[in-house]
Amino acid sequence: MITDQLKTIAFGLLFIAFSACSSDDSITDEEEDDDEVTISVESSNFLSGGLSESITIESRTLSDGTTADCYKIVVTGTPTDHEMGPWCPDNISDDASAGGIWLEDGNVYDVDGDFVKNLATFYNDDTWMLYNSTTGEITKTSTETECDEAANPNVGEEYENYCVECLPSYVEGLTHTYYIPVTPKKADTPYSFSTGLGGASTVPSSRGLAFNGVVFDAPAPVDNILGAYTLAPFDDAGGHINLAAGYHYHAATGISSTIEQSDGHAAMIGYAFDGYAIYANTDADGNEATDLDSSRGHYDETRGYHYHVDNAGNNNFINGLRGEYAL
């Protein structure tokens, strides 16, 4: 009898221990069951002014080898909800309205005349000198050829100490085609942009699309830019231009179109290329989400799984794709 009682007690202790190890607190987002709520992409959220043609649906192969209906979205890359630029101020006497912004170590800086004047101090390197010490005029690119050569990662010494400014007129008529699954599909292993783990051999080089059709791009290669003693500012919307990509964003600053949430949740700003929605960094009270997974996403019953963009100063949007994406 005593032996049976001991067995019962031991079994109970084992059950309690097993239950504790299996509690919800120890389950990561990647280990959870399928979402109870999955929100499909609303093609009507995209502004017609940013589209080169009407959005259609095509069957495409996804990163896991299956096929799914995807929206074919052909964009001009030209925002109709805000102006592009300015980027480089003309003179070190100019205020912030004459220039764009720079992203450094989590902070957003106005590229005004003082910022350009004090680059040597900012980077603790006396090589920086982007202006004429007599007139105060800032040295910047002024033609399409100069834009092409100075924006190249292998920029030559002749463009050292230039402010790189590529203008919208250089990319007129440029279009890009993107495919986004109509309904997001959770991947077995999320794809990480930093490690390259997960996903297929072919992955998107960008992160997603704003409602105005402008792409959320990968982090700007600031080390290459700064290494050549050039500065390639973003405009106040977080965007700039190169001849291949056209106008594109490297940060979400709250200027492009958003969809506000009635419950005070952060506003929606676009879609990632796996079809999950992307929301702003902070909610209506200015608070950041504290339970984001490694991709910068989390789940709620109103919006399903969704992402929150990184702080604008981090030159980043999201860290990975939690869902399958079109190849």
Image (cartoon, rainbow, N blue to C red):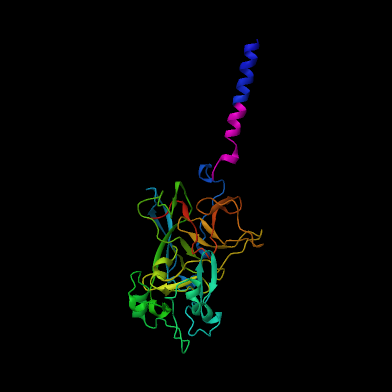
> Is residue 201 rendered to the left or right of residue 211?
left
Query: Is residue 267 depicted above or below 240 in this figure?
Result: above
Q: Position of residue 215 (x, y in %)?
A: 45, 66
Query: Is residue 300 depicted above or below 231 in this figure?
Result: above
Report the label total: 0
Q: Look at 54% across and 72% down and name the residue there.
A: 109
Please tell me whether residue 16 belongs to the stretch shown in magenta.
yes
The furthest residue to the top: 1
The quarter holding residue 13 reads: top right
Can you say which quadrant of the picture contains the N terminus?
top right
* Res. 167 in view: yes
Q: Position of residue 148 (x, y in %)?
A: 35, 76
Majority secondary structure in the magenta region: helix
The quarter holding residue 164 reads: bottom left
Q: Look at 51% across and 79% down and name the residue there.
A: 99
* Foreground residue among 257 and 87: 87
Query: Is residue 123 depicted above or below 311 in this figure?
Result: below
Please tell me whether residue 212 belongs to the stretch shown in magenta.
no
The quarter holding residue 178 reads: bottom left
Task: Give the magenta part as a residue range.
Answer: 15-28
* Foreground residue among 14 and 155: 155
